[in-house]
Amino acid sequence: MGHKKLIRFEALNSFPNVLQNPEKIAGEWRNFFKNGNPITLELACGKGEYSVNLGRNNPGRNYIGVDIKGNRMYAGAKTALEEGLGNVGFLRVRIEQIDRYFAAGEVESIWILFPDPFLRDSRAKNRLTHPRFLHVYKKILQQGGIVRLKTDSKELYDFTLETIKEQGCTIQENIADIYGTGKATGDLAIQTYYEQMHLAEGRTIYYVSFSLPEHIELPERFIKHERIERD
């Protein structure tokens, strides 16, 4: 591991706005933020740029950037501390395990921003809008909670629309080209470093938001895996 990474990992241990695999935090986030404001997650947050900007734009809401890569998370966490953004926190855990860190209904909404699309069909289970992830989100989202996907991948966008239809999710908004249609406004207009790169390359940015049904249909192999983990 490089010297810079070691320094950043050490710094994260001292950052009060970063939790790494915390115990007994589920149901206690109001104590972390010292308020009961609604909570939004940014999954696979990378450097946390979106979480920081969401926090700047919406001081009456709480935001948590979630990622397993602390080296990247350091940048957003440091910025949030320097700016005194008490409504922005970071959680270093694996996304497929986030239901261990939030109580039922503790999260109001989820942002998924430019995730790895895992284009090979053999890796579809790793897509963050795959039913196995929606099943996890369902456990922590409040009733009617919203999942928002913003991506430059047409393949992931199409896969998500297909999954939404198969699972009986309710689409809240579906925009096949947010900039071409002039709908990149408000929180949707926030641009990360990578989004700026995608736009400079002339790539189309897709967006869809949806709420989950009462039940997510999981393939049997994932149901068995979940039983093993619980046992």
Image (cartoon, helix red, strand yellow):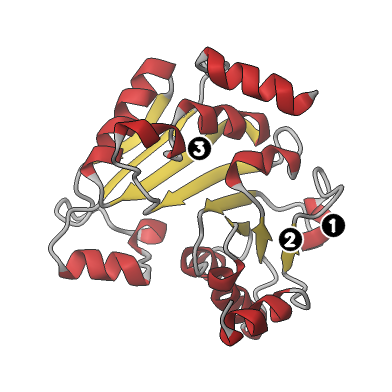
Q: Could one spot residue 125 in this view of the protein?
A: yes
Q: Earlier in the sequence, mark 2 or mark 3?
A: 2
How far is the residue under mark 1 from the one under mark 2? 16 Å
Q: In this view, does 157 lie to the left or right of 210?
A: left
Residue found 66% across the figure and 53% down from its top? 93
Question: Depth check: 23 or 30 in front?
Answer: 23
Mark in front: 1 vs 2: 2
Q: Which of marks 3 and 1 is nearer the N terminus?
A: 1
In the rendering, which numbered label is found on residue 89?
none
Q: Position of residue 20 (x, y in %)?
A: 74, 61
Residue tagged 1? 31
Residue tagged 3? 146
Residue found 45% across the figure and 38% down from its top? 126
Question: SS at mark 1?
Answer: helix
Q: Is residue 120 left or right of residue 12?
A: left
**Which amino acid is tagged 3?**
Ile
Question: Depth check: 132 or 150 in front?
Answer: 132
Residue tagged 2? 20
Image vertical order of residue 95 relative to residue 56, above or below? above
Q: Could one spot residue 143 in this view of the protein?
A: no
Question: Depth check: 159 or 161 in front?
Answer: 159
Q: In this view, does 7 lie to the left or right of 76?
A: right
